[in-house]
Image (spheres, grey):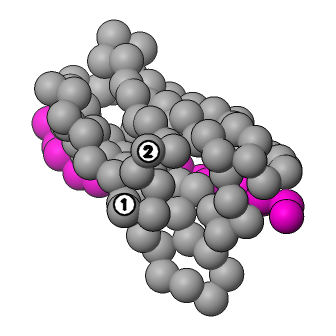
């Protein structure tokens, strides 16, 4: 069974930094796109940053220049370095990945989510 586990959330003052990490585990054959999403109370989940298996990245306009996504294909990890944090960045952050894995019925490709990690930025 494939699992994504996030770590690194917490409480930080405005202007501070946090680094989120996510590791994928299970009978993984390959990982395609990976990304970080966030969901604030009363709002829809939104893409924060994405990265392809080849390293191409994209960011939400609201985080460009402040956040950096990276991945380590050998370790099945993706990270999000968040600098110059603002109160509006407060949300639950979720790791997402499209993974091909070996299942009982054979190889399967699907999207997986982590359990989420809370990021709170105080003003």
Which residue is label 2 attached to? Answer: 65
Which image quadrant: the C terminus?
Answer: bottom right
- Picture disc at residue 95: none
Instruction: Residue at 44%, 25% (x, y): give it.
Output: 77
Tags 1 and 2 in contact by the CB under 8 Å rule? no
Left or right: 118 as drawn, with respect to 80: right
Q: Residues within 10 Å of mark 1 (few under 14, many from 20)?
A: few
Instruction: Residue at 47%, 73% (x, y): give it.
Output: 45
Left or right: 20 as drawn, with respect to 61: right
Q: Which residues are magenta?
A: 105-123
Q: Residues within 10 Å of mark 2 (few under 14, many from 20)?
A: few
Q: Give the structural element (helix, strand or loop) at label 2.
A: loop
| In this rendering, the label closer to the viewer, 1 or 2 | 2
- Picture disc at residue 60: 1
Q: Nearer the viewer, residue 66 or 109?
A: 66
The answer to which of marks 1 and 2 sits earlier in the sequence is 1
Is 99 inside the magenta-drawn segment? no
Please say whether residue 25 is visible from this viewpoint: no
Is 118 inside the magenta-drawn segment? yes
Q: Residue furthest top?
A: 74
Q: Which of the 4 quarters of the picture holds residue 72?
A: top left
Residue 42 spot, x, y in % from top left = 62, 88
Is the stretch drawn in magenta largely helix, strand or loop?
strand
Q: Nearer the viewer, residue 31 or 93?
A: 93
Q: Which of the 4 quarters of the picture holds residue 98?
A: top left
Q: Is residue 58 above or below residue 92?
A: above
């Amino acid at each position: 069974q494939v699992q994504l586990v996030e770590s690194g959330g917490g409480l930080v003052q405005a202007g501070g930094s946090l680094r989120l990490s996510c590791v994928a585990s299970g009978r993984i054959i390959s990982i395609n796109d990976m990304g970080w999403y966030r969901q604030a109370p009363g709002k829809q989940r939104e893409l924060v940053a994405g990265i392809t298996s080849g390293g191409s990245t994209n960011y939400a306009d609201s985080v460009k220049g402040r956040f950096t996504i990276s991945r380590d294909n050998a370790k099945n990890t993706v990270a999000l370095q968040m600098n110059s944090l603002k109160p509006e960045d407060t949300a639950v952050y979720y790791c997402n990945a499209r993974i091909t894995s070996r299942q009982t019925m054979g190889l399967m490709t699907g999207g997986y989510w982590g359990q989420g990690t809370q990021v709170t930025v105080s003003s």
